[in-house]
Image (cartoon, grey):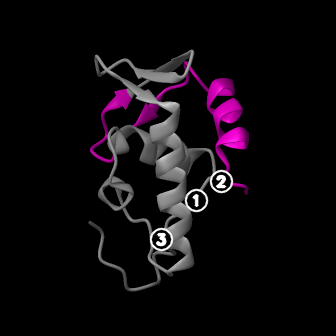
C-alpha cells in the first residue's frame, strides 16, 4: 500500500467517525476538519503535516527493516492515535508473532 499523504489523507477522511483503540485499549474516534485530524480524546488536532511526517518515518523504519511494534516507534505528536488508525487501515503491518521481536 502506498504511504503517500495524497493517498492516505483521503483514506483517513473515509474512516472518520469509526471507533479505533489505542495500544492500551482506549476507544477513540476522530474527525477531519481542514488540515487537521481531531481525536475525541484530545483538544489539539494532529495536522496533515504531522501525518505526512509519520508516514515518512514509517517508510524509513520499513526500509531499515525495523518493525513498527508500537506508537513510540513512530515518534511524533499523536502517535498513540495514528498508530492504531494507520495499522487498521493497512498502511503498515505488525511483525508476525512467530518472529522474536521486543514490543516497545
Q: CA distance from mark 3 to mark 1?
A: 11 Å
- Residue marked by disc 2: 3
Which residue appears at 30% of the width and 33% of the height? Answer: 26
Q: Give residue 95's position: percent from left, percent from top.
A: 49, 72
Residue closest to the far bottom: 100
Which one is nearer the viewer's eye here, 87 or 45? 45
Q: CA distance from mark 2 to mark 1?
A: 9 Å
Mark 2, secondary structure of its residue = loop
Q: Residue 90 vs residue 76: left or right?
A: right
Estimate the spatial distance between the alpha carbons at disc 3 and disc 2, rounded to whole Å: 12 Å
C-beta proximity under 8 Å, tags 2 and 1: yes
Percent across and percent down for residue 2 are 72, 55
Residue at 35% in and 62% down: 73
Instruction: Give the labeled residue for mark 1.
Output: 92
Classify mark 3: residues with Cα within 10 Å, few (<14), some (14-19) or many (20+): some
* Residue situated in front as seen by the camera: 72 or 50: 50
Q: How many marks?
A: 3
Name the residue rendered at 52%, 32% in the picture. 48
Tell me which residue sits at (39%, 65%) in the image: 69
Q: Magenta segment: does it hold 32?
A: no
Q: Position of residue 72 (x, y in %)?
A: 29, 57
Instruction: Tell me, for residue 61, which label it has, or none.
Output: 3
Does residue 61 show up? yes
Give the left or right position of residue 103, taking residue 29 as reference: left
Residue 4 falls left or right of residue 37: right
Give the magenta part as a residue range: 1-27
Q: Is residue 22 visible?
A: no
Which image quadrant for residue 9? top right
Tag in front: 3 or 1: 3
Q: Residues within 10 Å of mark 1 (few under 14, many from 20)?
A: some
Pick the quarter of the image with the N terminus: bottom right
Q: Earlier in the sequence, mark 2 or mark 1?
A: 2
Amino acid at each position: 500500500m502506498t504511504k503517500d499523504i495524497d493517498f492516505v489523507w483521503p483514506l483517513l477522511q473515509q474512516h472518520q467517525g469509526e471507533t479505533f483503540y489505542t495500544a492500551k485499549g482506549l476507544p477513540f474516534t476522530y474527525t477531519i476538519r481542514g488540515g487537521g485530524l481531531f481525536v475525541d480524546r484530545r483538544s489539539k488536532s494532529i495536522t496533515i503535516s504531522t501525518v505526512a511526517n509519520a508516514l515518512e518515518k514509517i517508510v524509513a523504519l520499513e526500509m531499515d527493516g525495523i518493525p513498527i511494534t508500537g506508537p513510540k516507534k513512530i515518534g511524533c505528536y499523536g502517535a498513540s492515535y495514528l498508530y492504531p488508525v494507520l495499522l487498521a487501515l493497512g498502511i503498515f503491518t505488525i511483525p508476525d508473532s512467530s518472529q522474536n521481536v521486543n514490543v516497545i
